[in-house]
Amino acid sequence: MTPLALTPPAIEPVSLSEAKDFLRILADDEDELLATLITAARLMIEAASGRLLIEQGWRLALDRWPQGGEIRLPLSPARSLLAARVYPAEGGAEPVAPSSLTLVAGSDPPLVAIAGPVPQPGRDRAGIEIDLVAGFGTTRDTVPAPLRQAVLRLACRWFEHRGDVVSRDAARLPAEIAALVAPYRRARL
């Protein structure tokens, strides 16, 4: 299963003004750098936690339907299924009926249940595509406070110590930030 990003988040979980207030910055001359660090910090926290913070669109490409009738999604939290299609050996995609796939409420990791008939793909690779929306929500207040705090602290740490800690932090989150992320981390088996 290959996840492909379709639409990025409309906003970051931490605003530029929040970060500037945290850092006690009044000038605007480094806003672009700080905004870039906020985005980078969000991506790092999303990777560390296995959770997408702000709602975003994704496409999953599968080779075939699973035998057990459930698709375990690599993106969490999953909010909604938008569309699914299957590619025959030749020609355009066939849509999958919306009633044939159901997002299982409350499952973690998120699951899609095959609830009806689905056409079989005709090509060996990426014969199935599922478009979905994942993330805690569309606004900053839908993101759990510890994860927002982790993004804020990581971006501000990188800003304050430009060039000094970024390479170390890329290998492993600092302990105080990892502690904020830990309750949301998805265990890998």
Image (tube, helix red, strand yellow):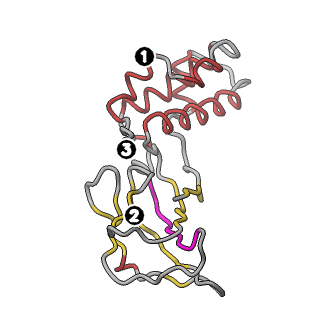
What amino acid type is highlighted by mark number 1?
A: Glu
Dominant secondary-structure state across the stretch colored magenta: strand
Q: Is residue 13 left or right of residue 124?
A: left
Q: Which residue is mark 3?
A: 142
Mark 1–mark 3 distance (CA, rounded to whole Å): 22 Å
Q: Which structural element holds mark 2?
A: strand
Disc 2: CA contacts within 10 A as few (<14), some (14-19) or many (>=20): some
User: Mark 2 or mark 1, which is nearer the start of the sequence?
Assistant: 2
60 or 79, nearer to the observer: 60
Q: Residues within 10 Å of mark 3 (few under 14, many from 20)?
A: some
Distance (Cα) linking label 1 and label 2:
33 Å
Image coords of residue 146 (percent x, y)? 37, 29
Secondary structure beneath disc 1? helix
| Residue 133 belongs to magenta span | yes
* Residue at 47% from the left image edge and 46% from the top image edge: 54
Give the percent coordinates (x, y) of residue 185.
38, 35
1 or 3: tag closer to the N-terminus: 3
Q: Residue furthest bottom?
A: 91
Q: Which residue is mark 1?
A: 176
In the rendered structure, find residue 80 and report the number of the disc placed on it.
2
Mark 2: amino acid: Ser
Residue 76 screen position, x and y as percent:
40, 49
Q: In the image, is residue 75 above or below residue 104? A: above
Distance CA(mark 2)–CA(mark 3): 16 Å
Circle 3 SS class: helix
Q: Could you classify mark 1 by the number of other residues whose Cα lies within 10 Å: few (under 14), some (14-19), or many (20 or more)?
A: few
Query: In the image, what residue occupies the spot 44% across and 16% down?
Result: 175
Give the image quarter of residue 114.
bottom left
